[in-house]
Image (cartoon, rainbow, N blue to C red):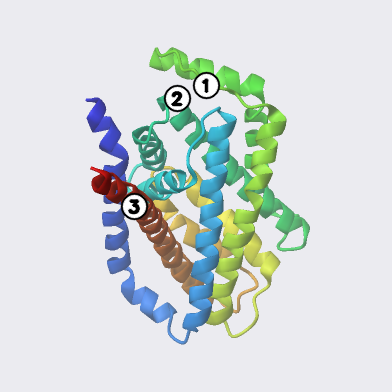
Amino acid sequence: MKRVWRTLGILIGLLGVGFVVRELIRNWGDVQEAMRGADPVVLVAAWIVGVGSMTLIGLTWRRCLSVLRTEFPVLVALRSYFVGQLGKYVPGGIWPVVGRAEMARRDGVAGAAAYGSTVLSMVLTYLAAALVAMSALLMGAGDAGGWSWLPPLGVLVLGVVALHPVVAEGGLRIVRRFTHRELSLVIPRWSTSIFLLLAHVPSWLGISAATWLVASTLDSTVPDFQNLLYATTLSWLLGFLAIGVPGGIGVREAVFIAAAASLSSPGVAAAVAVVARVLFILVDLAGAGLASAAIGFQRRPASEHSRSSG
């Protein structure tokens, strides 16, 4: 049974690849239409920025593990992160958590630390998205006097309160009661959690910059970065909160189209949303493949050396 659980992360990753491919095939006509006239160089640059941004999130998850007193090699952490990321494309809201945590368990991380760090990382990631969305509004990205400030502000306030050790320890006691397990987990200091939240901000600036690059090659006008910063972070945040929707597909795009007021038309906003979605799917696939390949290359010299020694 233990062996089955240890392979669960890989199975979720493989299922994620399957759902990703299905989604790409299903929407390929829309993607081709949206990309007509786009500059490939700009799209490649956006993809590179996207890879860097998602890698930063993976590295910050490794820091969450370190805070929970678990050290994890960089490449192994990135493989667990990116393969686990593919779980978000599998229907059902729990698979990105289970995929990443079970990949970490497969590589020797204790179960409580694997799941605890994954939940902490995901909470911090999207609290940072709420913080960046609020900051963009304050910089004039949208109508701060309307409804637009409510979702990010509400998520940010509730999330920061939930990070307080007293509240977090209370939540952990409830989990222990329901699972009937003595979960040994370090609760980070509030200041440490806030620092880790802020450490996710550069990733959202990068994700938004990648989206801006996509918009710059699809729109005839130069898009306003502050507005796309708000539209991108808000759409990812609400897509994440749409539990049960694989990867927030549909929700993220609808919110982006509504919020991206600086683009020349809703049709252009829809094209940007579709192309950006595909771009980040390719980022997730590439991250999983490159991290796995890097570990394989890293281990090959050691195995060759042991064979030659024998």
Residue at x 57%, y 64% (from the top left corner): 258
Please identify the quarter of the rendering in which residue 135 is found.
Answer: bottom right
Residue indicated by mark 2: 112
CB under 8 Å between discs 2 and 1:
yes
Dot 3: within a 10 Å radius of its alpha carbon, few (fewer than 14), some, or many (20 or more) residues?
few
Mark 1–mark 3 Cα distance, whole angstroms, equals: 37 Å
Mark 3–mark 2 Cα distance, whole angstroms, equals: 33 Å
Is 138 rendered above or below residue 275? above
**In-front residue for pair 100/70:** 70
Q: Amino acid at mark 3?
A: Pro
Q: Which image quadrant: the N terminus?
A: top left
Q: Is residue 73 left or right of residue 89?
A: right
- For mark 2, give the secondary structure: helix
Locate residue 209, reporting x and y percent.
Answer: 61, 66
Q: Nearer the viewer, mark 1 or mark 3?
A: 3
Residue indicated by mark 3: 301
Residue extending furthest right?
Answer: 139
Label of residue 185 in the image = 1
Q: Which image quadrant: the C terminus?
A: top left
Residue at x 52%, y 20% (from the top left corner): 172
Residue at x 49%, y 47% (from the top left corner): 240
